Amino acid sequence: MILTSTKTFNSATFPEVSFTVRVLNRIERARRDAGIAAHRAEFSRLERERAALLRSLIPGADFESSSGAVAANERVMALPLADKERLFALKEEADIVHSAQIVPAEIRAALISITGLECDGVPATVESVIASAPDELIIEIHAACVSASGLTAEQEKNLQSLGSSAKQEDGTIESSTVPSAS
């Protein structure tokens, strides 16, 4: 048996950049998750609060189908300003927790090295990437870190929104390039 504990990706956004991530097993995912459990719980609480507020403001709205979501969005835009501000504030709070706490922790847990990138004239490190890399590259690196965690992107999303572990899938990504998330 040959064990591969790292995966190297060529950036689709910045062709001169490549990065290597650690393939996380169950133990390493648990260590990563233990460090951000409170942040995931806060993210989940904010998302639940926003969903409950939406359901109370727009009873019976269909948020699941694309046509229902468009209609619900139109109904949100017709809400009084104070209600819209509260919905947007909850969304912004959740996004801040995700971007400032969860994403950096997931990158720190998996990103080993990056080549072809300098920050202020010095070869990039994990911390300098988190602090200074362009958003497009952060999104790409984060997607690679999530894919190398042994969980699908949907399972990672569920893990963040539910605050609990998702079922582990056996498999790695096929491509050596990770497309940018939109």
Image (cartoon, rainbow, N blue to C red):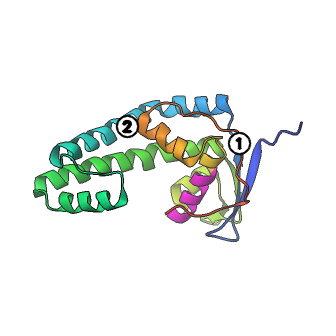
Q: Is residue 38 left or right of residue 127?
A: left
Q: Is residue 38 magenta?
A: no
Query: Which mark, residue 79?
Result: none
- In the picture, measured across the screen, residue 22 lies left or right of residue 156, that is right
Magenta span of residues: 134-144
- Disc 2 marks which amino acid? Ser
Q: Main secondary structure of the magenta part?
A: helix
Mark-to-mark CA distance, 1 and 2: 26 Å
Q: Is residue 128 visible?
A: no
**Does dot 2 land on a helix, a strand or a loop?**
helix
Residue 174, horizontal then vertical, whole percent:
73, 55
Label 1 with label 2: CB-CB less than 8 Å:
no
Asked whether 41 or 66 is in front, the reply is: 66
In the image, residue 70 sits, relative to residue 1, either above or below, namely below
Q: In the rendered image, which residue does mark 2 sit on? A: 44
Disc 1 is placed on an element classified as loop
Q: Quickly name the residue at label 1.
A: 23
Residue 102, given in percent of the width and then of the height, sits at 48, 43
Front residue (pair 61, 155) = 61
| Circle 2 crowding by C-alpha within 10 Å: few under 14, some 14–19, many from 20 | many
Residue 29 picture location, percent across and down? 61, 34
Residue at image position (32%, 61%) is 67
Residue at x 37% of width, y 49% of height: 96
The N terminus is located in which quarter? top right
Q: Give the mark nearest the N terminus, 1 or 2.
A: 1
